[in-house]
Image (cartoon, grey):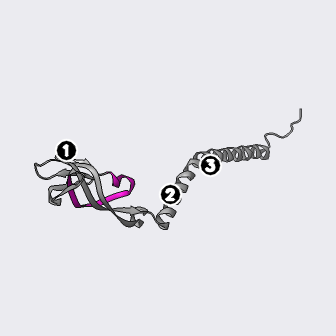
Amino acid sequence: MQDATYDTGTVTVTNESKAWVNETGYTLSQPSSYLNPTGYTITAIYNITDASDHVSVGVGNATVSSSYVVTNASATTYDNVSISYTFNYDASNDATNVMGNTSEGIAGVSDWFDIFIVIGAMVVLILLTVIIITAIRGSGLMSGGSA
């Protein structure tokens, strides 16, 4: 239930630099700090040849996997690029926080089950002992005898 109540947020990352786009792939750094990042969309890629020259690379030259790895769709390798992209993530809200706290509370209660079982078994044994002693006394087996 908690997963179904998250709010969806969107993040725009502009000019993540010192990246590369080749066949082995580049892992985007931003998404790892967000909960369940999905729906990556590359908005711009610039090949940086020097500090003043930013050449646009077509966004069709790159694909993004579900593990936020950017790979090159063509044979060209770009070893110094700046990547801009957007992605969605799950954001906590009051409902998800309450459900998380409830789950943690219920998980903590199960630690006490062993103790409850042992105490219950002790009470049952004590009651059985009292019942047996009362039954023996009431049967007359313990009455005083005459010589």
* Number of numbered callouts drawn: 3
Query: Quarter-wise, where is residue 133 in the image?
Result: top right
For the residues carrying marks 3 and 2, which lies nearer the camera in this image?
2
Q: Residues within 10 Å of mark 2 (few under 14, many from 20)?
A: few
Q: Residues within 10 Å of mark 1 (few under 14, many from 20)?
A: few
Helix or strand or loop: what does disc 3 sit on?
helix
Is 2 contained in the magenta span?
Answer: no
Three-letter code for the amino acid on which mark 3 is drawn: Phe
CB of mark 3 within 8 Å of CB of mark 2?
no
Helix or strand or loop: what does disc 1 sit on?
loop
In the foreground, 66 or 29: 29
Alpha carbons under labels 1 and 3: distance apart: 57 Å
Q: Residue drawn 33% across and 58% down?
A: 37
Sequence-first disc among 3 and 2 = 2
**Residue under pointer 2:** 103
**Residue under pointer 1:** 24
Three-letter code for the amino acid on which mark 2 is drawn: Ser
Name the main secondary structure of what is drawn in magenta.
strand
In the foreground, 130 or 60: 60
Alpha carbons under labels 3 and 2: distance apart: 21 Å
Q: Residues within 10 Å of mark 3 (few under 14, many from 20)?
A: few
Q: Give the residues drawn in magenta, as a range.
A: 29-48
Q: Residue drawn 44% across and 63% down?
A: 92
- Give the x, y percent position of residue 5: 42, 67
When the figure is inspected, residue 39 is found, relative to residue 146, above or below; the finding is: below
Sequence-first disc among 2 and 1 = 1
Alpha carbons under labels 2 and 1: distance apart: 41 Å
- Give the x, y percent position of residue 142: 81, 39
Is 38 contained in the magenta span?
Answer: yes
Residue 67 visible somewhere in the drawing: no
When the figure is inspected, residue 111 is found, relative to residue 85, above or below; the finding is: above
Question: Residue 116, labelled with which disc?
Answer: 3
